[in-house]
Each structure stands twice: as C-alpha cells, then as structure tokens.
C-alpha cells in the first residue's frame, strides 16, 4: 500500500461547503490522499474561534463531489473540526487539516477574526498538522488555479516534515498574473481603522454597517503584507499560545503583595 493511499486529509473552510475555493482545495488534496470534508452549511466568514453552545448542531452527509466523503455542519468552522475529530473520525486523527481556500486575504491582524484560520487552529489544538489558505479575491468566480501548485508543495512538505507542536501555517496568495515564489514571513504590524456607517431603517431606527481602512504600521520587508505586495505567497507560522512571554519579566517587577 502506498503512502498516499494511507493518508487522510481533513478539508474545512468558512465560506461554506459549496464555495468555489473549497472545491479547488478538495481537487488538489485528492491527489495526495483520502479526503474527508466537514464544512459549514452556510458562509461563516469572520466568526473567529466561535463555537456553538446554546443550540444543537447538525451534521449531515452530502454528495456534492464524486469519491469524496463530505458532511455539512450547521455550526461554525471550529465546530466543524470538533465534530470531525469526535464523530467522523471518532478520535482517530487525520494526517493533516487544511482550511480554505478562502475568498479574501487573512494576513496580519486578520488572522484573529478569520474563520478559515480558526478552523486550522482548532486542528492544531487537536495536535493535527494544520494549514489555512487564503487568496486575494473576494469574487465568487475567483480563479484559484494559480494557487494550486503552491498548495501542493506546502501540504507535501507538512506531510513529510510535520510542524512544531502547537504551530500552524497561515498561507496567503497574491492576486497577480505570475506568483514569484514562497516567502516565510512574520505577521505584519497592521490594523483596521474602523468606522460605522450610520443609517436609518423604515421605522426611523438607527442601524450600522462596519467599514474601515487597513492601516499598515510596518515597513519591514520580512512581513506577510510585504510578500503579498511583491507578488509572493506569504507563509506565517502562528500559534495558539497567546502568552506574551517577553512581558513576564516586566510584570514581575510590579509590587503585587497584599
């Protein structure tokens, strides 16, 4: 039996089980192993690491693409991973969890809000080597084909070498005619300067639409934003341990005795 035949690949996303990006990812992963898909039954963008606790979850087998075991989940992207591990795989972990390909970038600060990356992060929490993929195109008919060779390269490397425990990869693709290559990067120091567009409904009540401008406060040439702006695929290793280790000595100098 070949190594490929024994691999199991969990595919998840946040754009929904029928999104074009997940079809491209499924097709690419079918060449590398047995694919199992657990994805939301509707778009779940910007849900972050939310989980469902106040209502029941549903997990239904669907038949969308041939020769692929697929389930749609009524919950969030993180719910999808939790149900995959506990109910679909019944505790036996897949060899890798891949999330995406997301419509729109998840570079810099966006990693915090991203359902795509939170699904991959949940995989890492379960000690599954995990990767999130995002592409700089929000359109439904986005052409993901230029991403595929790089997806395969990165997934093959993760399958071969694994990842450090507690680490996952945040991969973003530029929307350019020719991608120059892959850059290992750090997360850029950037944020959204947010505003709320205030409007009136027919009953004269206020309602709000979130808007904002992306502010880059980082001139480094080793960041994900720089790589994408210069036609490279950005690869940022991220972790779910949020401890600011560098701040511990600072806090230890505080007078905290009662």
Image: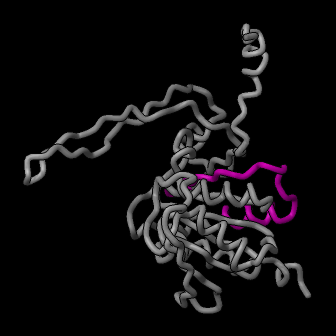
Label total for image: 0
Could you tell me which residue is drawn at 48 percent across and 30 percent down? 216
| Residue 153 appears anywhere in the view | yes
State whether residue 20 appears in this view. Answer: no
Q: Which residues are magenta?
A: 149-178
Residue 26 in the image: above or below residue 230: below
Residue at image position (85%, 81%) is 6
Quarter where residue 116 is shown: bottom right
Residue 93: give x, y in percent of width and height. Answer: 80, 71
Q: Work out whether 128 lies above or below 257.
A: below
Q: Residue furthest front?
A: 258
- Looking at the picture, does residue 55 appear above or below residue 178? below
Residue at left offset 87%, top offset 59%:
161
> Does the magenta segment cover residue 169?
yes
Taking the view exactly as shown, the residue that stands out farthest to the right is 1
Q: Which quadrant would the C terminus be assigned to in this image?
A: top right
Q: Position of residue 206 (x, y in %)?
A: 17, 43
Name the foreground residue: 157 vs 201: 201
Res 100 quadrant in image: bottom right
Image quarter (top left, top right, bottom left or bottom right) of the N terminus:
bottom right
Q: Nearer the viewer, residue 109 or 145?
A: 109
Which residue is drawn at the image coordinates 8% and 54% (left, top)? 202
114 in magenta: no
**How far across and how far down the image is residue 35, in percent?**
69, 80
């Amino acid at each position: 039996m070949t190594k490929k035949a024994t691999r199991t690949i969990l595919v998840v996303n946040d754009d929904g089980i029928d999104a074009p990006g997940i079809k491209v990812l499924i097709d690419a992963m079918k060449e590398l192993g047995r694919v199992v898909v657990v994805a939301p039954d509707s778009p779940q963008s910007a849900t972050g690491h939310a989980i469902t606790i106040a209502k029941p979850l549903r997990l239904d087998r669907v038949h969308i693409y041939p020769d692929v075991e697929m389930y749609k989940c009524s919950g969030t992207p993180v719910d999808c991973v939790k149900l995959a591990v506990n109910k679909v795989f019944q505790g036996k972990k897949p060899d890798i969890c891949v999330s995406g390909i997301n419509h729109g970038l998840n570079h810099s600060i966006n990693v915090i809000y991203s359902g795509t990356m939170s699904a991959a992060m949940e995989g890492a929490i379960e000690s599954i080597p995990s990767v999130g993929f995002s592409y700089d195109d929000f359109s439904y008919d986005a052409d993901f084909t230029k991403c595929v060779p790089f997806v395969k390269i990165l997934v093959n490397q993760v399958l071969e070498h694994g990842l450090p425990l507690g680490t996952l990869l945040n991969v973003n693709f530029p929307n350019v005619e020719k991608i120059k290559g892959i850059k290992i990067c750090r997360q850029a120091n950037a944020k959204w300067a947010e505003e709320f567009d205030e409007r009136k409904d027919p009953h004269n009540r206020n309602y709000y639409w979130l808007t904002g401008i992306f502010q880059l406060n980082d001139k480094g040439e080793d960041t994900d934003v720089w790589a994408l702006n210069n036609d490279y695929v950005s690869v940022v290793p991220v972790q779910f341990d949020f401890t600011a280790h560098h701040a511990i000595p600072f806090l230890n100098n505080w007078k905290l005795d009662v």
